[in-house]
Amino acid sequence: MQRQADVALRKYYISVAKLALFILSSNILFIILHRQKETAMLQDPLISIITVTYNAEATVAATMQSVASQSFDDYEHIVIDGVSTDRTLALVDELKTERTRVFSSPDHGIYDAMNKGLGSARGKYVVFLNAGDRFHSPDTLATVAEASTGKLSPGVIYGQTDLVDADGNFIAKRHLTAPEHLDFKSFRHGMLVCHQAFFVLRQIAPLYRMKWRYSADYDWCIRCLQHSRLNKYTGKVLVDYLLEGTTTQNRKASLKERFKIMSYYYGLIPTVLRHMAFVPRFIAARVREKMGKK
């Protein structure tokens, strides 16, 4: 009887020891996996998406949802807010994920806010996705990630752009088509690639020049291309750009700035001659516009 009791007691101790070992190993595994997740979150992502907002409650949700729905998850989403007075920040807080970082402070305009975004970015590539703009599909970042592979990292990865309304409905293709071959000289014909479809290697991305009020993005893209050794075309639509109305005054001011930027990089006389070639197309467009209103 004593021997049976000893055997039973030994089995009991062995069972307790096995249970304790199982619990201990499970806890250790949980800690290891948790730390691996934390480490992965601390590592620099492949892509930094920067969204600048100010009183954008009507448009920011679409952008946040577009980013969160991406199938590729090696990214960070940086929201730079200019101290919005509406529900922008509340919506951002509601829709943010563990990959979202939000900053809200006064700024000196959109390009100052973009510079803050560049200063906060940790990704290998940076792209600006304004409030209201969306990635064209859930696989957009996966497409960019695939294009980034190779012995030489592309300085610029780019694609096409569709124009959409506030509900995301297709309106038209962008009037300037992104070319299959892109280099510094390409932008002498204008901003051939939409800013939001222009992914740049962060190490070559300069700050925006604050002297340009309306066209600093055009100047920025040109300077990025100046320092890029390889530009890769994805062959796909990457961005749905929200088509919003701009005042005639701002449009004229933007065109004047772009003329100055073109002249600086590509020469005054070639720029003047190039703009003279634009005149017939401009007149034809205005005629079509007036006929359409009749």
Image (cartoon, helix red, strand yellow):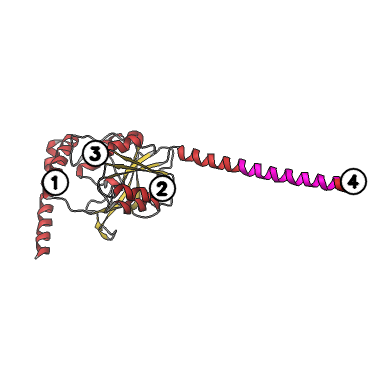
Camera-nearest residue between 134 and 99: 99
Name the residue carrying label 2: 97
Mark 3, residue position: 111
Label whose residue precedes the other's in the sequence (1 or 2): 2
Q: Quadrant of residue 79?
A: top left
Q: Is residue 26 magenta?
A: yes
- Per the model, the C-alpha gap separating discs 1 and 2 is 35 Å
Task: Report the front residue among 167 and 93.
Answer: 93
- Residue 136, position as x, y percentages in the image: 34, 54
Give the residue number, with chain letter if any, for mark 1.
250
Q: Give the alpha-carbon distance from disc 1 to disc 3, as whole Å.
A: 16 Å
The span from disc 2 to disc 4 (Cα, nearest Å) is 63 Å
Q: Local crowd at mark 2 within 10 Å, few (<14), some, or many (≥20)?
A: some
Residue 163 pos. (x, y %): 25, 55
- Secondary structure beneath disc 2? loop
Front residue (pair 114, 236): 114
Residue range in magenta is 6-28
Give the residue pinned by disc 4: 2
**Amino acid at dot 3:** Tyr
